[in-house]
Image: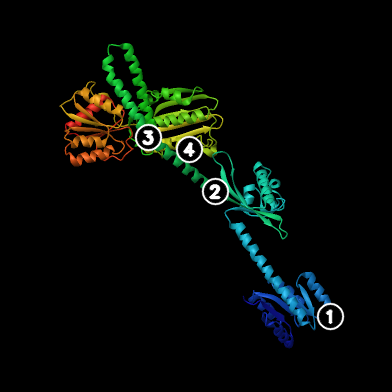
């Protein structure tokens, strides 16, 4: 540890020598016989801790020297004086220029003790100044809102960020409680939390939210009680950090996990449900010709077929939640799509909501994925319903729009779908955020924050735009503009295949599916076509049949089967039985990665679809 430095000032050389001898074992001693030189040394040596100065010196008295030094230096000052100079000592003490004096001739022990006390005072003062500077730097530059309060909750220190949170100035807050500065519910809650922390005497932390729901700012507040010399809590330090972004990321992660789980669940449900629908629709189709002369029974079968087909449409919507679901844009008539959602609106929106359609026949076809557009319209209607807790009217409108000079869109013709409600509306501070992924104003567990984000993403992907106009207390109007499809849609294959299909050439076909009902329906279709069909319950059984000499012209296999997937079965057949094509059937194409060169058909399917694909593959087509 370095020794402290003292400066001795006296116009008599013998006294300077005596002072140097007295202190050189304990301190680094500088000496000066002239007051002007002493002031220069003080300016050059900021580490001088104590100045010991004679009073009577030519040119400048000791008290005047020490008063001048006090203006620019922090050294502690001691005056050496005779009894006749006591008036100068009193004046110097009154001005604060010195901390004490020692009379000449001095007592060495007393002088050492006085200098030692002055040096300790200087050291402690410097340590305190350092701590104050560090604290001031922390308060002024920290990103956190920091404050120190006494046990009664009154501010002792605080930084500008803390003052800004209260809408006040630093100086105006000192000596006052938080509620005295800003009498709000948040301030009262803060004081209660502070009092609990002081009473407990232990550090703790809480997370609080400020602002309106959906646009709140989250803060993590750490409270640290500070104890005095007797052990009681005398002060409380609070450190408040903005953790809004962290909370947002945590919420996004939770929602991402939920949606990933939902996607996986949706895929699994879709696979099982499509298997059921394949068995139901296939069985109904097979029984149809047998009841052609029984109109009452046929009407019941037609009703069941229609219900199962609606179930198939529901499964497609379910798969829209799967993250791996592909978007396939094609020309879509928005009016027909919305009309076809009538039953869905009734079951999804409830009896308190009335759906009004204002569909312009001149609305062009839009180039968009129909399943995604249907899901987008449904999401907008559900949001409208939630904005009208007491019920109301949702208006779905379509129109043609020729848009030009829009920086967000290419000039051209667009199909515009508008959903308007009479609900609570969206506050302006939230309107800019409603399309952010995972942002929701609904209570925890009542919204994913993905509805409008999905609609916005659909608009962007299709080359369109999404616009939202809202007024609090009046309602919200959301407009989705989609580019016009350039070409007229080709007729769907399902609509153009022949009603009655027969085998073009005789063939033996192996049907492989772990679901016996689906397997039976598929085999029955093929039998009705005129093919010779054989059934196998799984991939291993199918390979065993083929290994034992069974010759087949085509294998129709389910994709997701236990033990061996359809893809694995196809690979084994290709390696062992050259020239035997494999057609995969699946209720969820994303369940297993499928090579591009393997033909796939989605469940549920009509018999005519199956006939067309089988005929194509037997003829050598892909």
Give the quarter of the image for residue 306: top left
Choose mark 1 or mark 4, whichever is in front: 4
Give the quarter of the image for residue 622: top left
Which sits in the foreground, 133 or 110?
Answer: 110
Q: Residue furthest left?
A: 505
Mark 1 lies on residue:
83
Of label 1 and label 4, which has the lower sequence position? 1
Label number found at residue 449: 4
Which sits in the foreground, 201 or 107?
Answer: 201
Q: Is residue 71 above or below residue 594?
A: below
Choose mark 2 or mark 3, whichever is in front: 3
Percent coordinates x, y for residue 150 in the rendering? 71, 54
In three-dimensional space, the C-alpha distance between marks 1 and 3, rounded to whole angstroms, equals: 104 Å
Quarter of the picture containing the N terminus is bottom right
Label number found at residue 268: 3
Of label 1 and label 3, which has the lower sequence position? 1
């Amino acid at each position: 540890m370095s020794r402290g430095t003292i400066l001795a000032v006296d116009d008599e050389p013998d006294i300077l020598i005596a002072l140097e001898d007295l202190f050189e074992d304990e301190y680094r001693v500088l000496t000066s016989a002239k007051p002007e030189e002493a002031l220069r040394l003080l300016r050059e040596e900021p580490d001088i801790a104590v100045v010991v100065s004679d009073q009577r010196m030519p040119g400048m008295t000791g008290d005047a020297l020490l008063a001048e030094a006090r203006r620019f230096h922090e050294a502690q000052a001691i005056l050496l004086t005779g009894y006749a100079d006591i008036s100068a000592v009193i004046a110097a003490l009154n001005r604060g220029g010195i901390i004490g004096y020692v009379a000449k001739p001095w007592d060495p022990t007393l002088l050492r003790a006085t200098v030692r006390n002055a040096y300790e005072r200087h050291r402690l003062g410097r340590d305190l100044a350092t701590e104050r500077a560090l604290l001031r730097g922390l308060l002024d530059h920290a990103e956190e809102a920091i404050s120190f309060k006494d046990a009664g909750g009154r501010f002792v220190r605080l930084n500008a960020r803390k003052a800004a949170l209260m809408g006040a100035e630093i100086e105006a807050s000192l000596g006052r409680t938080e509620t005295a500065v800003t009498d709000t519910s948040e301030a009262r809650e803060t004081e209660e939390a502070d009092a609990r922390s002081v009473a407990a005497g232990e550090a703790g932390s809480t997370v609080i939210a400020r602002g309106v729901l959906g646009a709140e700012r989250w803060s993590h507040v750490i409270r640290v009680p500070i104890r005095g010399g007797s052990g009681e809590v005398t002060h409380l330090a609070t450190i408040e950090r903005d953790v809004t972004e962290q909370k947002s990321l945590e919420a996004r992660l939770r929602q991402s996990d939920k949606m990933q789980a939902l996607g996986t669940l949706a895929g699994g449900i879709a696979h099982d449900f499509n298997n059921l629908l394949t068995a139901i629709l296939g069985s109904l189709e097979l029984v149809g010709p047998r009841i052609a002369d029984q109109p009452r029974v046929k009407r019941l079968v037609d009703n069941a077929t229609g219900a199962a087909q609606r179930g198939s449409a529901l499964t497609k919507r379910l798969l829209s939640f799967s993250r791996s679901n592909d978007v396939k844009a094609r020309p879509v008539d928005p009016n027909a799509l919305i009309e076809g959602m009538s039953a869905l609106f009734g079951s999804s929106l409830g009896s308190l909501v009335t759906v009004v359609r204002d569909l312009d026949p001149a609305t062009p076809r839009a180039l968009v994925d129909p399943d995604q557009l249907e899901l987008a319209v449904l999401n907008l209607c559900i949001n409208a319903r939630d904005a009208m807790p007491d019920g109301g009217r949702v208006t779905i409108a379509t129109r043609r729009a020729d848009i030009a000079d829009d920086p967000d869109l290419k000039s051209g013709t667009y199909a515009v779908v508008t959903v308007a409600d009479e609900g609570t509306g969206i506050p302006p501070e939230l309107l800019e955020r409603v399309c952010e992924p995972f942002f929701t104003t609904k209570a925890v567990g009542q919204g994913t924050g993905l509805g409008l984000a999905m609609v916005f993403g659909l608009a962007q992907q299709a080359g369109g735009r999404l616009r939202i106009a809202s007024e609090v207390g009046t309602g919200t109007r959301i407009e989705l503009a989609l580019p016009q499809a350039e070409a007229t849609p080709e007729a769907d294959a399902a609509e153009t295949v022949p009603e009655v299909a027969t085998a073009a050439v005789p063939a033996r076909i192996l049907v492989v599916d772990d679901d016996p009902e689906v397997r039976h329906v598929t085999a029955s279709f093929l039998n009705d076509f005129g093919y010779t069909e054989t059934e196998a319950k799984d991939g291993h059984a199918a390979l065993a049949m083929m290994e034992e000499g069974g010759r087949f012209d085509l294998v129709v296999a389910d994709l997701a089967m236990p033990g061996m997937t359809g893809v694995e079965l196809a690979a084994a057949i290709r390696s062992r039985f050259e020239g035997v094509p494999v057609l995969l059937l699946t209720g969820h194409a994303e369940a297993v990665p499928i090579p591009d060169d393997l033909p796939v058909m989605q469940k549920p399917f009509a018999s005519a679809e199956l006939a067309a694909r089988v005929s194509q593959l037997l003829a050598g087509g892909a």
